[in-house]
Amino acid sequence: MNDKKNKFTENFVKKINGILIDPVIFTYKFICNCAGECCYYGVYTDLEEYQTILSIQDQIKEVMDETQSKDVSEWFEPEEKDEDFESGIAVGTEIINGKCAFLDKNGLCSLQKLAIMEGEYRWKYKPLYCILFPLTTYEGVLTIDTDHIDRLPYCNIDPNTQLTMFEACEEELRHFFGEEGFAELENYREEYLNEIKIGEKEDVTK
Ligand code: SF4
Ligand code: SF4
């Protein structure tokens, strides 16, 4: 297991804010234009995010509809160890009526809806993995969850898109790295695309 882990991380050199960068994000073509199919499968939250959600359970219940359970004991799976999460513990959201416990009948995330209704930043309560998807961190590397994209029939199905994952997820990347880290990411992108242009690197997405 450790060998496999090392082999994957050895492919990457650039680190920003302690996270290695898989440069595939600069060339992989992606557009997010479906009605949120990724929310049908739930998400893993970090222990701290889970605790925040529990601390605002009464407010969340207020914005939920009849397709969602207001019984908090039904919202989450048991905690499990996972080193890709800051606390080292991940807690998955449960699936209720074929969708994440927090997805309402209109395809809106109750956590985001609540933040907007409170006049707060829209991602204030939203788990990081929901914000980032289809970007993800795996073994300390920011990369693309291509396995999950492939499992979703409506995700990234426009064959004509010219947008790259980096371009499509700019706001998410700014959120994740902060402005300084994002500027570093932009520089790395420029270097990497230039290396492809002059033939020093291969575009692995072609
Ligand atoms: S990430 Fe994929 S599945 Fe999720 S909303 Fe966008 S296109 Fe749909
Ligand atoms: S928490 Fe919200 S954004 Fe994340 S999977 Fe559930 S409904 Fe979707």
Image (cartoon, grey):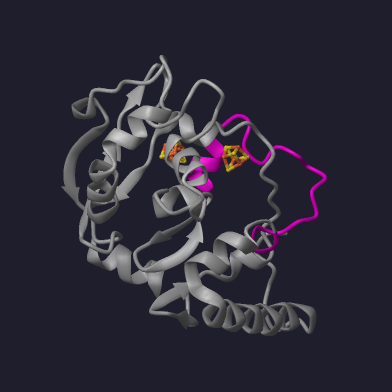
Q: What residue is rendered at 48% in x and 36% in y?
A: 109
What is the quadrant of residue 82 in the picture? Answer: bottom left
Quarter assignment of residue 56: top left
Give the left or right position of residue 108, taking residue 95 as reference. right
Q: Is residue 11 visible?
A: no
In the drawing, does residue 122 fall left or right of residue 71? right
From the viewer's perspective, is residue 85 above or below residue 161? below
Residue 55, position as x, y percentages in the image: 23, 45
Quadrant of the picture in which ligand 1 is shown: top right
Looking at the rendering, the stretch of residues picked out in magenta corresponds to: 145-167
Q: In the depicted view, which residue is nearer to us: 17 or 200?
A: 17
Name the residue located 42 percent from the left edge and 68 percent from the top edge: 141
Residue 103 as seen in the image, left or right of residue 88: right
Viewer-side residue, 61 vs 11: 61
Q: Position of residue 79 (x, y in %)?
A: 17, 44
Q: Position of residue 34 (x, y in %)?
A: 66, 34
Q: Is residue 63 above or below residue 201?
A: above
Give the prevailing secondary structure in the magenta stretch: loop
> Residue drawn 24% across and 55% down?
48
